[in-house]
Amino acid sequence: MLNVGAALATIPVVAITREAWAAQNAALRGALKYQDKPGKDGQKCSTCTHWVPGKTLTAKGSCKIIPDDDEISPEGWCVGWVAAPKK
């Protein structure tokens, strides 16, 4: 029973941590001028070197610049965009 109590005691800490990450990610998105649509000349997250793909080609993924944010659109763009090397 003690283990259950210890587990329950950590739940608020996890929630606070998630909120803190969400706030940090929102600030980073703002600083990077992230948008859910492509930038100039068709630049988009899925063609950026910082892009980490989701489970499918159209699924949201993540970005190496914005840690722990897995809600990045493959069609999105930010000022941190750098062309991925050609494969």
Image (cartoon, helix red, strand yellow):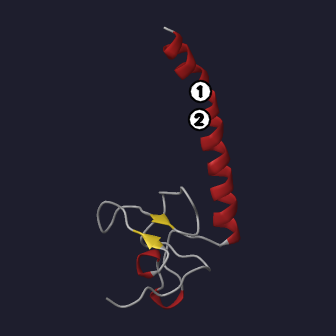
Structural crowding at the residue carrying mark 1, measured as other residues with C-alpha within 10 Å and reported as few (<14), some (14–19) or many (≥20): few
Q: Quadrant of the C terminus?
A: bottom left
- Taking the view exactly as shown, the residue that stands out farthest to the top is 1
Q: Residue at x 60, y 43 (%)?
A: 18
Spot occupied by residue 34 in the image (x, y as percentages of width and height): 59, 70
Q: Which residue is mark 1?
A: 10
Please identify the quarter of the rendering in which residue 67 is found: bottom right
Checking the image for residue 42, the label placed there is none
In this view, 86 is above or below 36: below
Q: Quadrant of residue 29?
A: bottom right
Secondary structure type for disc 2: helix
Please name the residue shown 53% across and 68% down the image.
64
Residues at discs 1 and 2 in contact (Cβ within 8 Å):
yes
Please report the residue visible at 44 percent of the width from the left and 85 percent of the height from the top.
Answer: 84
For the residue pair 72 and 68, the one nearer the viewer reads as 68
Which residue sits furthest front? 2
Q: Identify whether 85 is placed above or below 44.
A: below
Q: CA distance from mark 1 to mark 2?
A: 6 Å
Q: Amino acid at mark 2?
A: Val
Image vertical order of residue 85 relative to residue 2, above or below = below
- Which residue is pictured at 60% across the width and 21% down the height? 9
Q: How many labels, in total?
A: 2
Q: Amino acid at mark 1?
A: Thr
Q: Which mark is residue 14?
A: 2
Say whether residue 20 is left or right of residue 39.
right
**Drawn side of residue 3 relative to residue 10, left or right:** left
